[in-house]
Every structure is written in structure tokens, then in C-alpha cells.
């Protein structure tokens, strides 16, 4: 096995583990947020407080996480090849 293939396998495994961890954290945060929103809606039923929808918070959190993964991938590509998009001149 060449060092390059071993490095690529390492990257794939690391990315897979990171995605599994983030999806688990994402589910936990989603449950925490939904229960806190239900508790807040019961407490604030008499006042006119505008609550942020759960889907928007979840979408923004997921968008930020994928942006960070993309940034790390771009830095890794630049460090290993010297190009942001390898093979693209």
C-alpha cells in the first residue's frame, strides 16, 4: 500500500467519523431546542414574543457546520497540493 492511499483512507475515515459525531450532536441539539421551545411557548402564551422557527435554527446550524467542513477541506487541499482545487489550473 502506497503512502498516498494510506493517507486517503485516513482522510475518508476521519471525515466519516466527524460526520457521524456531528450528526449525533445535531440530533441532541435538535431535541434540546425543541423541548426548550415547547417550554417557552407554554410560558409566553400570554405575551406576543416572536419565536424563531425550529427549522430555521436547524438549517443555519447545519449550514455553518458544512461550511466549516468545506473550509477545512480547502485548507487540506492547499496544504497537500498547493492548489485550492487540485487539478484545476
Image (cartoon, rainbow, N blue to C red):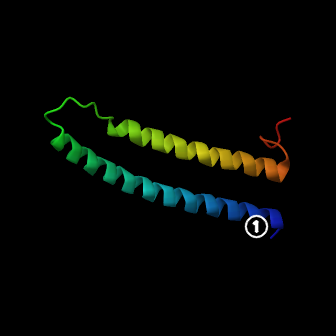
Q: Quadrant of the N terminus?
A: bottom right
Q: Nearer the viewer, residue 4 or 35?
A: 35
Residue furthest bottom in the image: 1
> Residue 85: horizontal and vertical position, in percent?
77, 40
Q: Quadrant of the C terminus?
A: top right
> Residue 33: horizontal and vertical position, in percent?
33, 48
* Residue that label 1 marks: 6
Q: Secondary structure at mark 1?
A: helix
- Asked if residue 10 lies left or right of residue 63, the reply is right
Q: Residues within 10 Å of mark 1 (few under 14, many from 20)?
A: few
34 vs 51: above or below: below
> Residue 14: horizontal and vertical position, in percent?
63, 62
Residue appearing at x 74%, y 48% in the figure = 75
- Asked if residue 74 lies left or right of residue 27, the reply is right
> Residue 49: horizontal and vertical position, in percent?
24, 31
Residue appearing at x 46%, y 39% in the figure = 60
Q: What count of labels does the image hold?
A: 1
Which quadrant of the structure image shows residue 41? top left
Residue appearing at x 27%, y 49% in the figure = 36
Q: Nearer the viewer, residue 88 or 24?
A: 24
23 vs 83: above or below: below
- Asked if residue 39 lies left or right of residue 15, the reply is left
Which quadrant of the structure image shows residue 7? bottom right
Residue furthest front in the image: 47
Amino acid at each position: 500500500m502506497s503512502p498516498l492511499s494510506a493517507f486517503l483512507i485516513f482522510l475518508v475515515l476521519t471525515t466519516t467519523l466527524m460526520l457521524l459525531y456531528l450528526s449525533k450532536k445535531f440530533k441532541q441539539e435538535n431535541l434540546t431546542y425543541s423541548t426548550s421551545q415547547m417550554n417557552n411557548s407554554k410560558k409566553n402564551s400570554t405575551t406576543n414574543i416572536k419565536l424563531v422557527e425550529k427549522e430555521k435554527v436547524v438549517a443555519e446550524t447545519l449550514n455553518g457546520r458544512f461550511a466549516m467542513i468545506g473550509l477545512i477541506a480547502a485548507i487540506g487541499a492547499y496544504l497537500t497540493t498547493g492548489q485550492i482545487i487540485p487539478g484545476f489550473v
